[in-house]
Image (cartoon, coloured by chain):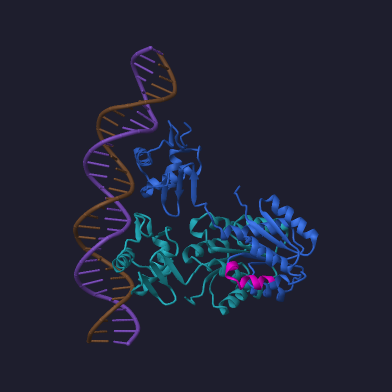
Chain colours: A cyan, B blue, C purple, D brown
Amino acid sequence: MEPKGKKILIADDEPDILEILEYNLTVEGFTVIKAKDGDEALHLAKQQQPDLIILDVMMPRKTGMEVCQILRSQPDFANTLIIILTALNDEASHLKGFEMGADDYVSKPISPKVLISRVNALLRRSFRSDDSIIKIGDLQIDKEQFLVKYHGQDIILAKKEFELLALLASKPGRVFLRHEILNQVWGADVIVGDRTIDVHIRKIRQKLNIDCITTVKGVGYKFELGTT
Amino acid sequence: MEPKGKKILIADDEPDILEILEYNLTVEGFTVIKAKDGDEALHLAKQQQPDLIILDVMMPRKTGMEVCQILRSQPDFANTLIIILTALNDEASHLKGFEMGADDYVSKPISPKVLISRVNALLRRSFRSDDSIIKIGDLQIDKEQFLVKYHGQDIILAKKEFELLALLASKPGRVFLRHEILNQVWGADVIVGDRTIDVHIRKIRQKLNIDCITTVKGVGYKFELGTT
DNA sequence: CTATTCAAGCACAGTTTATGCCAAGACGGA
DNA sequence: TCCGTCTTGGCATAAACTGTGCTTGAATAG
């Protein structure tokens, strides 16, 4: 639905490499964030919530391995894709990279094209489940046509309402934390008041007129069809 | 570790390689199916529906590339993981492999260990299953849904109660000191009275209505299912 | 075996917090 | 400008959380 390029964070202490990768990724339509050491990478990752992170191993102030391990220990980054990039090509490093929870481990030198194709391969797989039509019981959400149907009845939702519903319905039963919702629907950097989410939820509940969004106090919301 | 039991199809025309890979994957707990050419690979893929397929490029009767392309064109295999294995290490082949829809492209010679770690990396992400669900006997704690089930019965816990239970249940039998619990559930800086923990424990015991939290006087609490 | 002691259990009540809901303003496109 | 959408702040309410004071019970010492 959205040609909104995925957000990629690159961390490397060599400016040349950062430049080259940034250029190539930007051309491909990605949004690129750059970090020049481990600590900066961690900080930017938390702040920007990128979809994919490329980490060089040899970096000052925390190596790529360390950063990877730290990120993976946080639930927020359990689903973030991580590629480790390194000059080392020995088996032990390779294994260690995957042990740290990396999704791919690439040895330098590497052509930008190959790296991009690996990035695409990872993203393709992770977001493949973005089915454009979600069906749950009598409810049908068509992301492409921006349409919600219930019992064959068309229901008209505003943009934010729709995106919010689509997000919740994309994983029925799963609880979405408030800040997850903010990140996904509004974007990581946007700041909106606490009440905004509630109001949209209320409108969805009103319009759908069925009990399908459960609130988990202190945590977030989840989509759930009549589990009477 | 985990009950993997994933089904893997290997296709290569060199019997030696088949043997080596089969051995190593079997040791890791995978179920292995072997094919010695492209057509056989296709046939076995359809028949056995493996979770992951490893394809050598150089094979008689359809190359790995061709097999990959054919598989990807069928909805049944849209989600099947595919690794392409090859002696060619040039950029063009690399790119072509990903273009065909492969999830990973590995150049020979490759150590079985590295291949296995790549296999695991792919499977880990695709079947990103249940480290978010803790199951102990009839009790089931789903962190993703923020839900506790006992005997199929849903039990609703408040946030702190849930986090507390999840913590204790994360290591059954292990005793958690009071200050450990405070750190994990409340946060290191927050200061709350001594009785607070007791109260929450009591509520959990009430709601679950089973004897699963043992108190170790003077030390802390531990989770333990009625080893009557 | 009993008394002592102190951690933990317990009920209740006060406080805090999250969310629901409303109404009104801001924004933006036709 | 009008109209639908988005956002915000205030207020009410229900739920969650925490502290108090008392009771219970288990370990220990005598």
Q: Position of residue B220 (x, y in %)?
A: 44, 35
Specify start and end residues of the magenta stretch as a single range: B67-78
Residue drawn at 44 percent across, 42 percent down: B181
Q: How many marks?
A: 0
| Residue A46 seen in render | yes
Q: Quadrant of residue A89?
A: bottom right
Residue drawn at 35 percent across, 54 percent down: A218
Magenta-span inclusion, residue A9: no
Vertical position of residue B16 compared to residue D6: above or below: above
Residue drawn at 43 percent across, 54 percent down: B145
| Residue A15 seen in render | no
Q: Position of residue A9 (x, y in %)?
A: 55, 68
Vertical position of residue A133 compared to residue B175: above or below: below
Between B129 and A115, the one lying in front of the other is B129
Q: Quadrant of residue B25?
A: bottom right
Q: Position of residue B222 (x, y in %)?
A: 46, 37
Between B24 and B217, the one lying in front of the other is B24
Going by the image, does B14 lie left or right of A198? right
Magenta-span inclusion, residue B73: yes
Q: Position of residue B221 (x, y in %)?
A: 44, 36
Going by the image, does A178 lie left or right of D20? right
Magenta stretch, main secondary structure class: helix
Vertical position of residue A150 compared to residue B214: above or below: below
